Amino acid sequence: MLDEYEISRYDRQIRLLGVEGQEKLKNATVLVVGAGGLGSAVLTYLAYAGVGRLIVVDREYVELSNLNRQILYKDSDIGKPKAMVACEKIKEIYPKIQVECYNRAFDREFGEKIVKIADVVVDALDNWDDRLLLNELCVKYGKPMIHAGVEGWYGQITTIIPGKTPCLYCIRPLRQTRRSDVRNPLPVIGVTPGVLGALQAAEAIKLITNTGHPLYGRLLIVDLYSMEFRSIEIKRNPRCPVCGSIS
């Protein structure tokens, strides 16, 4: 049940989602893996939207070069664990929220424990090794996953429903970045992860409240340089080693 504070705070959203929709957000658990550029925007908007429980996983520490795009952090946070700082900021945004912070790598053992307790999973990672592992675990536990990736002025986003849409492994030929490539980080304009992260948050809200038309079987290509948005159809690979055998 929503109290008077929540009804007043979320009045504009309730006009669209109804009290029932806002209660669904309040009762939802969203796992966000990655608290960098994408994660900063996703976490901020989900906290402002009234999601009741956020789980944050990131093993990195705030660096000066992060501050052009990772909007949860400032100079005084340099050297601190991103996950911990992110959770402190989230609590400031919405004091009633439940947040769990993990300053650690996302690996299989940990992922097995954490993915299955989430209602929605957000891929805010920056490498394909971890993304494909997250994708595999989401398929295993039947969890919807919202993927986004960015480079320069460009981004891509899709929503994966195991057994119904292509999984990330089905479309992985679009790009593969190995963990070793972290030494040569991709260039990016600060607004790009902000836009894609906001889109991920919108997809999460739609999934939780069963509203609108999520990006099922579609990959949205965002080109901020020419300000063009293009949606392309993507299909499941029946021979996919990750999702091909489920229905």
Image (cartoon, grey):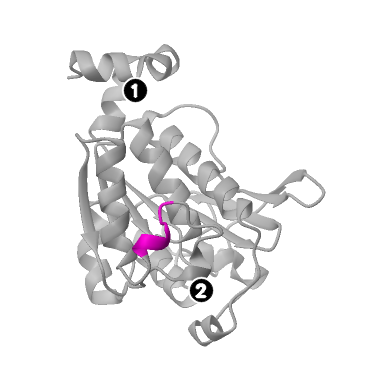
Residue 75 drawn in magenta? yes
State the SS at label 2.
helix
User: Residue 230 at what x, y percent from top left?
Assistant: 74, 45
| Residue visible at 42% across and 12% down in the picture | 15
| Residue visible at 51% across and 87% down in the picture | 180
Say how many tags the image has. 2
State the SS at label 1.
helix
Marks 2 and 1, how far apart at CA = 34 Å
Residues shaded magenta: 72-77
Picture disc at residue 21: 1
Of residues 129 and 141, the one nearer the viewer is: 129
| Residue visible at 52% across and 27% down in the picture | 212
Picture disc at residue 128: 2
Looking at numbered disc 1 in the image, what kind of residue is underneath it? Gly
Say whether disc 2 or disc 1 marks the residue closer to the N-terminus.
1
Can you name the residue that lies furthest to the right here?
226
Q: In which quarter of the image is the N terminus?
A: top left
Of residues 198 and 216, the one nearer the viewer is: 198
Looking at numbered disc 2 in the image, what kind of residue is underneath it? Trp
Residue 161 makes an appearance in the image: no
Residue 56 drawn in magenta? no
